[in-house]
Amino acid sequence: MKICMAAAFDIRNARSWSGTPYSLFCALDALPQTEIDTLDLSALHTGVLLRRNTLRHLDVARTLREKKAVSKLGVSRMNPLNSSLLRKHCSKDDYDVLLEFGGFLPSKDLPPYYVYTDSSHDLSLDFYAEQGHLPYGYRAEDLEDVRRAAAFVRPIYQNAQGVFCMSRWLARSMIETTGVPAERVHVVYAGANWHGVTAPSVGHARAVGDPQQIHLLLTGVTYIGKGVDLAVQAVERLNESGSVRYVLHVCGLREDFPHGDNVVNHGFVDKTALSELLGSCDLFVLPSRFDCFGIAFVEAMAYGLPCVGRNICAMPEIIDRGSNGELIESDDPQELASAIRKICEDPALYARYSESALQKAKRFTWENVARDMMRVIEGK
């Protein structure tokens, strides 16, 4: 079966989207029944095409009012150009299936297409309805743009042969909000991205390295969105009482942030350094205020690390509260501190959580994702 994987970025670059598309490409390419081609639509952009696309969909009134180019399509302003380029490419080749990252406009010139995604504009609107604000990364004034984009891209999902979702949370939104028939929505999850390093092979439950100095790890690229501020406050609380010292290791942030002696900011790190931290720390903490899936949890569990996350988004699908980790409900640093202490200061409980983490990580592999996708595509 000949499959074209299309995106507005280089799928074969292990740094694109944290390596997720490249991991899937490798897993699909390894299957005996597939022949995989990849298409980077952004490589086909030219100055003329970009300007033409901007002018064609310009919201003149808002552009004049805000004194900057505003598209009628909201945050999906690049979609028409990418869709046009995709149609031209597919007309020159005979693909059996098109697998899209992000989703492009349907057309009679396209082969049967599937979309693989961890989020959608409708999911952001669902989050807004539940939480009273858009996901972190958006501004309050972006709401109208998100609504425009959601309306524009709904037909992409509705007309797809299938939508592959990273979570049940997204799948519910696709069915209930976006209006995709349930039989065309498939939860396939995601896997850990180990490009450039050897995948962990932890065969047994771990123990805390030093019960008197416990090391916590948090990885994330946004200070507020990933709850780094909350983790810093929780560590301060933990070190105010008791004889155990807690040290928080933060990696992923390119800028410095306020912290005390018990917080180490490693900045942006490569996979080798991350692997070393996962192997040396005792607990993974990521109290994200929004997280589409949370591959970072999967990577931590593969090292036998129990995890602490937040009881929103897709995090409860990865962290089974009371089994492989804990889920907090609020922005109270004391709640986070209590969850951390509960796991780390009880050796028997920690070992049980570590073993459960290792077992849960086995569910989330790219080999499983590729096999599940092909079963759907082949109608098995």
Image (tube, rainbow, N blue to C red):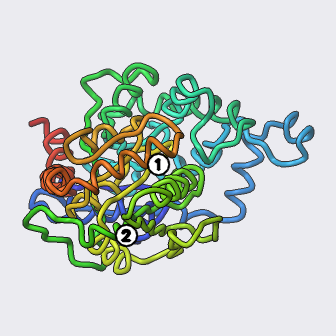
Instruction: Judge by depth and name the residue closer to the eye, 183 or 170.
Output: 170
**Mark before the other along the chain sequence, 1 or 2:** 2
Instruction: Judge by depth and name the residue closer to the eye, 201 or 233.
Output: 233
- Answer above or below: position of 276 versus 182: below
Where residue 152 appears, as percent x and y from the top left, is 58, 31
Q: Quadrant of the C terminus?
A: top left
Where residue 370 appears, as percent x and y from the top left, is 19, 52
Q: Which residue is mark 1?
A: 87
Looking at the image, residue 141 sits to the left or right of residue 314; the answer is: right
Amino acid at dot 2? Arg
Instruction: Judge by depth and name the residue closer to the eye, 264 or 23.
Output: 264
Q: Is residue 72 visible?
A: yes
Amino acid at dot 1? Arg
Q: Residue at x 53, y 61 (%)?
A: 221
Q: Which residue is mark 2?
A: 12
Task: Tell me where residue 142 sits by quadrant.
Answer: top right
Q: Residue at x 88, y 33 (%)?
A: 61
Q: Residue at x 41, y 71 (%)?
A: 13
Where residue 44 appears, as percent x and y from the top left, is 55, 64
Looking at the image, residue 303 sits to the left or right of residue 65; the answer is: left
